[in-house]
Image (spheres, helix red, strand yellow):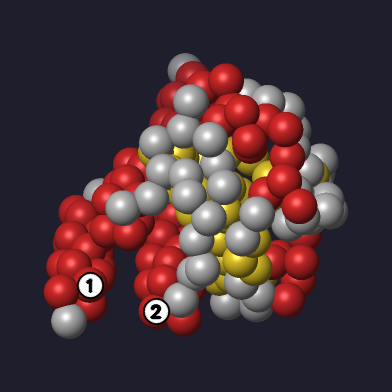
Amino acid sequence: MKEELINYETLLKVTRGISHSKDPEEIALMTVDSIKTALNTKGCSLFLINRKTNELELAASFGLSDEYLNKGPLSAMHSIAQSLDEGPVAIYNVMDDPRIQYPEEANKEGIASILSVPIVVGEHLIGAMRVYTAEPWEFTLKDVNFVQALAQIAGMSVNMARYAKGLKSSIDVLKTMKEVQSQIAKNDTPL
């Protein structure tokens, strides 16, 4: 019961924070921090897929060292790719699982287990949320559902924040163009 209460409090905290923020980086960081804290794990990261390079790019992370985070590019095709295609993947032992792209680096970081869940907005896969534990961890269905729920909320919020920023940029460009047209019109009037 206490675990469920903590998860509900975390959901409330994240959704309340998201409703006050339009910054995708802030939303992502708040979400990974909240998941790490609620589950009491080593760390949590949110990755977004770069469609040009087919790599997972770090959007936010909490609890992991810079050395681990900068270990090299994460291929969407090789780094727990099954979670992007088929849904959540829980890896009990990072050293014994071929789906881990950097097992030695994970071991050096003190990571024993990883949960990876896809982030899907509408019909589009946009990234993955990953939870890292220091001890071997049998992720429960409650753990998976909790992480999936927050991953989806964060994904939708990051997507909407990106859209809002893009829309604002578009509006600013249109305003600038109107001002330029207005100046041109003023300068083109015959004397």
Q: Residue at x 73, y 76 (%)?
A: 86
Q: Which mark is residue 3?
A: 1
| Residue of label 2 | 142
How far across and how far down the image is residue 161, in percent? 40, 53
> Can residue 118 be seen in the rendering of this structure?
no
Callout 2–callout 1 Cβ contact below 8 Å: yes
Q: Secondary structure at mark 2?
A: helix
Q: Reply above or below: 173 against 24.
A: above
How far across and how far down the image is residue 105, in percent? 67, 30
Q: Residue at x 56, y 60 (%)?
A: 115
Is disc 1 surrounded by few (<14), some (14 to 19) or many (20+) residues within 10 Å?
few
* Between 75 and 36, the one nearer to me in the picture: 36
Q: Which mark is residue 185?
A: none
* Nearest to N terminus: mark 2 or mark 1: 1
Q: Secondary structure at mark 1?
A: helix
Quarter of the image for the N terminus: give it: bottom left
